[in-house]
Image (spheres, helix red, strand yellow):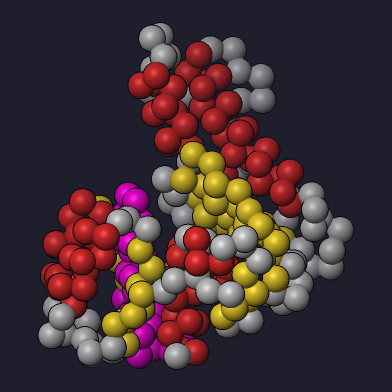
Amino acid sequence: MNIAIDAGNSRIKWGVHDGSRWLDNGALATADVAWLSEAADEWPVARVVICNVAGSEVATSITALLAGRHSQVSFLHASAEACGVRNTYEHPRQLGADRWAALIGARALLGSACLVVCAGTATTVDRLDAAGVFRGGLILPGYDLMRAALASNTAQLPLADGVFRSEPRNTMDAIVSGCLQAQLGAVERMFSAIATEPGARCLLTGGAAARLAAHLCIPFQLIDHLILSGLVRYAESL
């Protein structure tokens, strides 16, 4: 039995896995980390593995609320190699733990080259080759962060709530379409490097994944809980 916790900038996601399937999962705002204790009260005694990109205070809070509940608690940090994935980052430990977990999860699902896209507060676009080697990736502001940046840093552009159009003819649609095109363009340009490889596809996860999926023009698969799945795969290797 394993419990996986993904502490992100906006949300904390968690899941209880029995080795073959998810028994339970949930999410809450990162600002409400203290409320994770209510979920933890219902968890079975199990190994807990955590990835945290929300800062040291969140890590301390999670560690404190798990104290006395679970004796096996570990934080995932990127390393040179784990679970069939080799990390070629210039400084391997500087790779975000969430990105590393997603790569591990992707490798457990696919033996072919893939693009691992986590669409959340930030969008990360990471390339994994057929041999399990991480070949590098991108970090860009997520869709909502792009919209918010325009609204807060310009005098006349609102926090747009338009629709995606190939030829926008009003400001709301122009902002929404521009932010989405930026996301889609980054993903599709990165995918072009592996597009001709057998079985290549994009694995898409995160809160904004469905919004991107509606407009992607490459082979893709929406994956729920990819980061949590990577954490479980890592826990099983310990």
Q: Position of residue 92 (x, y in %)?
A: 56, 66
Question: What residue sits 49% from the left and 89% below the top?
Answer: 237
Q: Is residue 34 magenta?
A: no
Q: Is residue 132 left or right of residue 228?
A: right
- Residue 112 visible somewhere in the drawing: no
What residue range appears in magenta? Answer: 1-24
Q: Position of residue 193 (x, y in %)?
A: 80, 53
Q: Is residue 9 left or right of residue 236?
A: left
Question: Depth check: 177 or 114 in front?
Answer: 114
Q: Position of residue 38 (x, y in %)?
A: 13, 70
Question: What residue sits 44% from the left and 80% below the top?
Answer: 232
Question: What residue sits 70% from the left and 71% below the top?
Answer: 133
Q: Is residue 192 left or right of residue 127?
A: right
- Location of the C terminus by quadrant is bottom left
Question: What residue sits 27% from the left and 60% below the top?
Answer: 56
Classify residue 66 by image quadrant.
bottom left
Q: Position of residue 102 (x, y in %)?
A: 53, 66
Q: Is residue 20 left or right of residue 201?
A: left
Q: Is residue 14 magenta?
A: yes
Question: Depth check: 131 or 196 in front?
Answer: 131
